[in-house]
Amino acid sequence: MSTSRSVIKKVLSVETEEGAGAVVRRSIGSPQLRNITPFLMLDHFHISKGAGFPDHPHRGQATVTYMLQGSSLHEDSAGHKGEIKTGGVQWMCAGKGIIHAEMPVSGDNIPDPRGLQLWIDLPKQYKMVDPSYQELDPEKIPEAYPQGEDGPVKIRVISGKSHGVESPVRPLGGCWYFHVIFKKPGTIFQELPAGWTTFIYLWSGALQVGSESKPHEPFHTLVLSAAPGENGVQLTATEENTEFVLASAEPLDQPVVQYGPFVMTSREEIQKTFIDYQLGQNGFEKAHVWKSEIGGR
């Protein structure tokens, strides 16, 4: 038996400025939807020429950057650098601390970079691990076709499992993350682990969830139920070119104490993070000496 989850909260994401001239639609992390464990923030970003996210620190969370259009360069204080291309993903575990810059590739005849950045809380026992990366170029992200390659829907499996297809990404803490693309109207059922926190962010087309009769419109975040017996979600696209992400993760039974890019479980840990950053220690050794090459472009 397939029993679908349903929408229990719906929030519209409005464009606001963030970083150095970037425009974002913030869904999770806004006053209307502060956070839904373990998800801390979701930004749908659009970066124009000369804008971006220059050098800044992180501690205590994972950040997942998925490019929908254009590409973005990244560089960090541990010597890691690269480019996230259209359809590619970077899954960064900040752990005990990293300083990095994220800057778009812009220029004549190059589409403005657009993408999604999702912040996920780390389980308490992993907050002080060494930083790590899992990166997939577009062709390395596995794709599922629930109704065959000629069917109406394709699912890009960024992490987790969908219709017999599994991603190689292994997050700390359970998390499934899919980019679902309906080129034509259609219906699928996506199985999900019991009790996990689940949301959908829609940016194109129209989508019905479960037994709903009225479709949802673009730029809405839909938080889903997680009642016993609800083993997945029925998704019906009522228009061509309906696109959204579906994310589901194991909720964490721990406090969230956040100050900007620092996410810990107590005020004392946040205060210790400030001290570590000021003194350049415990993951922030290069806080006051490192400058990225791309951040000043």
Image: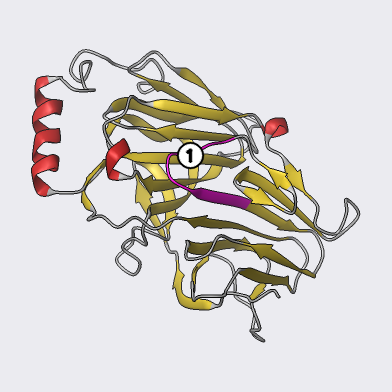
Left or right: residue 177 compared with residue 21: right
* Label 1: which secondary element: loop
Q: Is residue 211 placed above or below 117 in the rendered structure?
A: below
Q: Which residues are magenta?
A: 169-178
Give neighbour class at mark 1: few <14, some 14-19, many 20+ (Cα, 10 Å).
some
User: Residue 297 at x, y = what percent?
Assistant: 40, 21
Observer-nearest of 171 and 24: 171
Left or right: residue 179 compared with residue 60: right
Q: Residue at x 44, y 33 (%)?
A: 92
User: Residue 56 at x, y = what percent?
Assistant: 29, 31
Res 70 → quadrant: top right
Q: How many marks?
A: 1
Q: Residue at x 30, y 57 (%)?
A: 253
Q: Residue at x 32, y 36 (%)?
A: 126
Residue highlighted by disc 1:
171
Per the picture, the main secondary structure of the magenta-coloured stretch is: loop
Q: Is residue 265 placed above or below 37 in the rendered structure?
A: above
Res 281 → quadrant: top left
User: Residue 86 at x, y = what percent?
Assistant: 64, 36
Q: Is residue 256 placed above or below 136 in the rendered structure?
A: below
Observer-nearest of 256 and 76: 256
Disc 1 marks which amino acid?
A: Pro
Left or right: residue 295 compared with residue 178: left
| Viewer can see residue 105 | no
Which residue lies most toward the bottom here? 213
* The stretch drawn in magenta includes residue 194: no
| Viewer can see residue 289 | yes
Q: Residue at x 53, y 56 (%)?
A: 247
